[in-house]
Amino acid sequence: MQTAKPENVRAYLLDLQDRICASLEAEDGREHFQEETWQREEGGGGRSRVMEGGAVFEKAGINFSDVRGAQLPASATAARPQLAGGSFRAMGVSLVCHPENPHVPTTHMNVRFFHAEPKEGEPVWWFGGGFDLTPYYGRREDAIHWHRTAKAACDPFGEEIYPQFKQQCDDYFFLAHRNEPRGIGGIFFDDYNDGGFENAFALMQSVGDHFIPAYQPIVSRRKGDQYSEPERKFQLYRRGRYVEFNLVYDRGTLFGLQSKGRTESILMSLPPLVRWDYDWHPEPGSPEAELYDVYLKPSDWASKVVG
């Protein structure tokens, strides 16, 4: 296996955070990201950036972290017992955007690199990441664009990559207790080291670089749409699913808390406002019902045509 180059990954991730912040600030047009740097007592640190109360984004957070430790937390060794007791270095960029307008989808993106030094054997490394979209009101044009861009990020690395990563995204971002997906998916991968370090690193970069081309055109199309109070109420209700997933299932949240990461940075993905309504169901034939009936079902959006 090729030797990993963590410092090259770190430089890319810092630049990616800068580029995404600049793009989101330009799209918002009013607010700017506030930055806070932090250090972790056990080793490493990061810089967290949050924008709140914007013209478009009610809350957007993008976090860079590069943390180290003498021993892996339980969440990382459950499936890899051979790494128990070994030191580690984990770095990544993770973001969530919560627009105020219900017609602009929420989105999540993460790219990450993991390097471990087991007590016995050779060092182990892998990449992971992806991006997914959570609309409140489904738009066929947006779903097709999102998945075609995700496919474009994967295609240079093999025609099998996008279907595999899409399926992994559908499987991962699923709320079993609700028996429903979080949104329309995208791509997701983990434990990836195929083709050696340079190939795997290039794939991770392609995923990171395709996020803004996937998301920005959708924001631009929808941010001026008029919306009603009932639509806003539905958005806040559906945000509850986002909170449920992040606190119950998300492996990144669990890893961050177990590795004694910075709590404010770990939980910055949560929306500023949310609601739960008891046993609520959409009216049949309504736009809200269409979200459940059409968009919250796995679909091969990349092969569909607009219209």
Image (tube, rainbow, N blue to C red):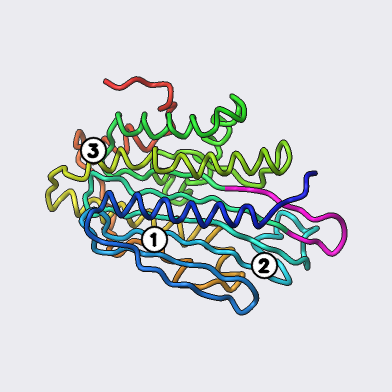
Q: Position of residue 30 (x, y in %)?
A: 22, 58
Question: Which mark is first along the chain, 2 or 1?
Answer: 1
Looking at the image, tell me whether mark 2 or mark 3 is earlier in sequence order: 2
Which labelled disc corresponds to residue 73? 2
- Amino acid type at image mark 1: Gly
Report the quarter where the N terminus lies: top right
Q: Secondary structure at mark 3?
A: helix
Category of crowding for the residue at label 2, using alpha-carbon neighbours closer than 10 angstroms: few (below 14), some (14–19), many (at least 20): many
Name the residue type under label 3: Arg
* Quadrant holding the C terminus: top left
**Mark linked to residue 221:** 3
Q: Residue at x 54, y 35 (%)?
A: 167
Residue kind at label 2, given as amino acid type: Pro
Q: Which residue is under mark 1?
A: 61
What residue appears at the point 46 percent right and 49 percent down from the top-left corner?
109
Mark yes or no: residue 180 visible: no
Could you tell me residue 119's position as x and y percent? 84, 64
Foreground: 49 or 286?
A: 49
Which residues make up the magenta segment?
Answer: 116-128
**Residue 194: quarter of image:** top right
Q: Mark 2: which secondary structure?
A: loop
